[in-house]
Each structure stands twice: as C-alpha cells, then as structure tokens.
Image (cartoon, grey):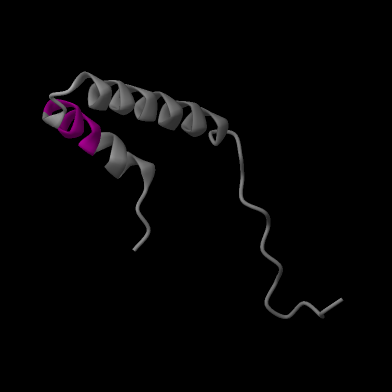
Amino acid sequence: MKITPWYLVALTPFAAIGCSGAYLGHAAVVALTVGIFLGTLSLGSTPPPASPPNAPAS
C-alpha cells in the first residue's frame, strides 16, 4: 500500500496537538512547511510515459 501525502497532512493537526514542548512544535511546523514546499514542486510534474508491452528492446 502506498501512503499518499494527503494521509500525512490529515494527521498533522493531531501531531501538533500532541507536541507540548516548544522544540517539537517548531519541528512540526518546519515539517509541514517542507511538505507544502515539496508538494508544490510536484504539482506540475507528470510521470514518464510507459513503453508499450510489445516494444522491442533497444
């Protein structure tokens, strides 16, 4: 099973609630920021086209 980023985004508020220390709270914010940044980078990307199953090896 592949875990999509949306599952992690959905669990982020619960992780932030569980952080009682300042360092853990800042780490959660940084992780969320990096996740949003990487998500925006992958918005326009498309997977490479798959070769047909009967294509000759080159």
Asked where in the image residue 52 lies, by quadrant, the reply is bottom right
Tell me which residue sits at (37%, 30%) in the image. 31
Residue 41, x across and y down, in percent? 56, 31
The image shows residue 22, relative to residue 56, as above or below, that is above
- Where the C terminus falls, by quadrant? bottom right
- Where the N terminus falls, by quadrant? bottom left
Whether residue 12 appears in magenta in the rendering, the answer is: yes
Magenta stretch bounds: 11-17
| 44 sits left or right of 8 in the view | right
- Chief secondary structure of the magenta portion: helix
| 27 sits left or right of 16 in the view | right
Asked where in the image residue 25 lies, by quadrant, the reply is top left
The image shows residue 7, relative to residue 51, as above or below, that is above
Report the number of discs.
0
Tell me which residue sits at (35%, 53%) in the image. 3
The foreground one among 21 and 50 is 21
Whether residue 50 appears in magenta in the rendering, the answer is: no
Residue 50, x across and y down, in percent? 66, 63
Residue 18, x across and y down, in percent? 12, 31
Residue farthest toward the right in the current orientation of the protein: 58
Residue 23, x across and y down, in percent? 26, 23
The image shows residue 35, relative to residue 3, as above or below, that is above
The foreground one among 32 and 43 is 32
Asked where in the image residue 57 lies, by quadrant, the reply is bottom right
Tell me which residue sits at (35%, 27%) in the image. 32
Tell me which residue sits at (67%, 77%) in the image. 53
The foreground one among 11 and 24 is 24
| 47 sits left or right of 5 in the view | right
